[in-house]
Amino acid sequence: MDLQLKGKTVVITGGTRGIGAAMAELFAREGADVAICARDADRIASTVTKLETFGVKAFGAAVDVSDSAALQDFIHKAAETLDGIDMYVANASSMAQGNSEAHWRAGFESDVLGVVRAAEVLIPYLEAAVSRKGDASFLTISSMAATQVAAANAYSGMKAALTNLTKGLSREYASKKIRFNTISPGVIYDEDGSVGRLRTTNPDFYNALLEMNPLGRMGVPDEVAAMAAFLSSPLSTFTTGANIIIDGSMSTRVNF
């Protein structure tokens, strides 16, 4: 399937590991120019080099998305380098797991305000994309944890807020043809990620997570990336305000 991404531009936060890296590579394979940010400058450099091997333009910068000025400066530089922004994927997260004030503040600054601040500076670029190419997309990466609550936890709370925020933005900007959607992954295995590390640091918990999934396995980053590329593409121009759950039916709620 041709996703019609060739010649388009995408900005991805948290683009050097796991789901973020898989998305960046898939967009590049599909012919989109890609800008990424993350906190690790060395990983940024190696990821940009890899993306360029697909014959596209790539740009990267070391950025903490909870730093408003740094995030907005990165977006402006990405737009300048790539000649505009057609698609944005808010993937970076503080991953703040806990119930202390510090956890809640970290989650709010990164997962929620990081999107609010990005939207503030992105809207003119996305409006220009609609004018030039007929479509613009803003995708947020939430989590099934937003609705699966075992205890008070900043990560779950902020992902719930993010999903709500994205739906609101979809309503606010629908008339401008700027689409806002959410993907809520379940347990996604990446050897270099938090779930991958559990396999050696806490094998009992890892196996318990594995057994909770009706499919008998965990997801992989490429499976989330495929949905991200489709939702961001011109093939999804009537899809906005959606929350797509990719969890192998691990969650028990019905997504009305």
Image (tube, rainbow, N blue to C red):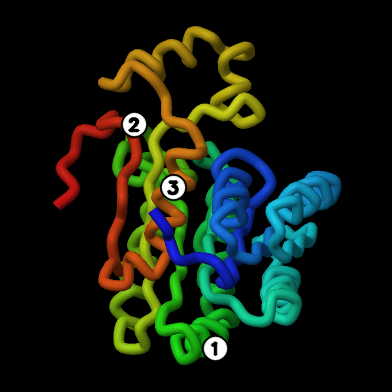
Residue 18 or residue 73, whichever sits in front: 18
From the image, tell me which residue sits under label 1. Answer: 124
From the image, tell me which residue sits under label 2. Answer: 150
Residue 242 or residue 165, whichever sits in front: 242
Q: Which of marks 3 and 1 precedes in the sequence?
A: 1
Q: Residue 202, position in %: x, y?
A: 56, 12
Q: Are marks 1 and 2 in contact (CB under 8 Å)?
A: no
At a point 57% along the width and 74% down the height, the residue shown is: 117
Q: Amino acid at mark 3?
A: Ala
Disc 3 residue crowd, few under 14, some 14–19, many 20+, Cα 10 Å: some
Q: Residue 110, position in %: x, y?
A: 59, 58
Disc 3/disc 2 C-alpha distance (Å): 30 Å
The numbered mark at residue 251 is none
Q: Residue 189, position in %: x, y?
A: 51, 27
At a point 45% along the width and 40% down the height, the residue shown is: 153
Q: Which secondary structure, mark 2?
A: loop
Q: Which of marks 2 and 3 precedes in the sequence?
A: 2
Q: Amino acid at mark 2?
A: Ala
Res 105 → quadrant: bottom right
From the image, tell me which residue sits under label 3. Answer: 226
